[in-house]
Amino acid sequence: MANTKRTLFLKRRLRVRNKLRKVNAGRPRLSVHRSNKNISVQLIDDVNGVTVASASSMEKALGVVGKNNIEAATKVGAAIAERAKKAGFEEAYFDRGGFLFHGKVKALADAARENGLKI
């Protein structure tokens, strides 16, 4: 039975998330989702089960509506770092999900780090 791209992605996402959960207990999770047209990120407090802050390329205020490129990822990363600070969180752990850490996902993480969020 051949594994499809989707099943491999789901396995990789669970593997990454479970490894991170063991190491980073007590810190909020910065979860990234990337689609073909947009990129979004959420700061999730897993202890209380709430989303503390979020940012997306679908927001008109960021000026990158409907774009999924490195420029959009850097703006979303800067926005989430700003909103996390406003919510009172200085550090989080980066949950890339099943996505590889290069390109847009890496640009988002670097922008969040540059704007003061410790990942």
Image (cartoon, helix red, strand yellow):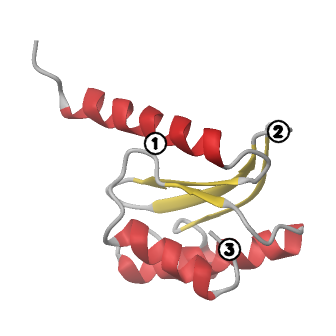
Label 2 and label 3: CA atoms lie apart by 19 Å
- Provide residue 54's location: percent of width, then percent of height: 69, 60
Local SS, label 3: loop
Q: Is residue 13 above or below residue 62?
A: above
Decide which of 82, 110 is in the foreground and name it.
110
**Can you say which quadrant of the picture contains the N terminus?**
top left
Decide which of 68, 84 is in the foreground and name it.
84
Q: Is residue 114 above or below residue 25?
A: below
- Provide residue 10's location: percent of width, then percent of height: 37, 32
Q: On the picture, is 55 further left or further right than 11? A: right
Local SS, label 2: loop
At label 3, the amino acid type is Lys
- Can you see residue 64? no
Asked whether the beta carbons under mark 3 and mark 1 sit within 8 Å of each other, the answer is: no
Q: Which residue is mark 2?
A: 47
* Label placed on residue 116: none
Q: Which residue is depicted at the point 60% across and 77% down? A: 112
Q: Which residue is depicted at the point 46% across and 42% down? A: 16
* Label placed on residue 118: 3
Q: Which residue is mark 1?
A: 16
Q: Which residue is depicted at the point 46% across and 46% down? A: 97
